[in-house]
Amino acid sequence: PIKLGILASGNGSNFEAIAQAMENGQLNAQIPVLIYNNPGAKAAARAANRGVETVLLNHREYKNRETLDQQIVQTLRQHDVDLVILAGWMRLVTSVLIDAFPNRIINIHPSLLPSFKGLHAVEQALQAKVTITGCTVHLVCLEVDSGPILIQAAVPVLPDDTPETLHARIQIQEHRILPQAIAIAASQISHQTARREIAAK
Ligand code: GAR
């Protein structure tokens, strides 16, 4: 099974969806580590409940984004991670992380990219008065919320929606498409590994 390193900042419902998909046999993976940056993040408690090792890397204790990312890379390498999942990771990532895991970092974003990049994507969609929004799973590149798209799901905006009600409807789709996208990326990685092994013979 592929080894996932999960980065989370808050609630961790997407971590839970990944763990659930593993439990149901929909995703053949292991989670050797969950890294979180906010002390008290519910994601860490959820991981601990499922016996997943957690590591707190509090960004407030690092002098810049690069030094935080160096520590993240070291932690991911120590756990022999194949694929990195930003599951509600609310920090910008730098080339330090991206170059260490090229095409091996996946992000989930609560809008139909390229619309509503950055923070508060759900509020942005409401303010724009769109009638359809959604979520996107994509590979991470240096430009924020811009890498190749793996899967998207559309979600209707209803007339009385608040940021909370709309976000809840989007999250139902996130929890469905994030494990699917991970399964696709994982099968690509295992094919690459198999080809490399054949070539080395
Ligand atoms: C998710 O809706 C995810 O799309 C969003 O944070 C939420 C985390 O939920 N991510 C971003 O906005 C990234 N810029 P969770 O902690 O319950 O998984």
Image (cartoon, rainbow, N blue to C red):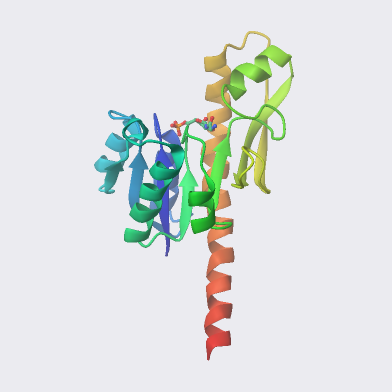
Give how far across and how far down residue 92 sits, in percent.
52, 36
Which residue is located at x 45 percent, y 43 percent?
66
Front residue (pair 109, 151): 109
Along the viewing direction, whichever of 18 and 96 lies nearer the viewer: 96
Residue at the spot x=35%, y=36% of the render?
Answer: 62
Question: Dividing the picture into quarters, in which one does residue 29 lie?
Answer: bottom left
State the image coordinates of residue 178 (x, y, percent, origin top left): 54, 44
**Seen in the image, is 184 located left or right of residue 157?**
left
Whether residue 33 is visible to the viewer of this picture, yes or no, is yes
- Residue situated furthest bottom in the rendering: 201
Q: Is residue 25 above or below residue 88?
A: below
**Residue shown at the point (29%, 48%) measured from the top left:** 52
In terms of image quadrants, where is residue 185?
Answer: bottom right
x and y percentages locating residue 68 in the rendered image: 39, 42
Depth check, front residue: 75 or 184: 75
In the rendered view, does 80 fall on the left or right side of 144?
Answer: left
The residue sitting at the front extreme is 63
Marks counted in the figure total: 0
Q: Residue at x 32, y 59 (%)?
A: 78
State the residue in front, 91 or 79. Answer: 91
- Residue 31 in view of the camera: no
Quadrant occupied by the N terminus: bottom left
Q: Position of residue 177 (x, y in %)?
A: 58, 43
Q: Is residue 156 above or below residue 187?
A: above
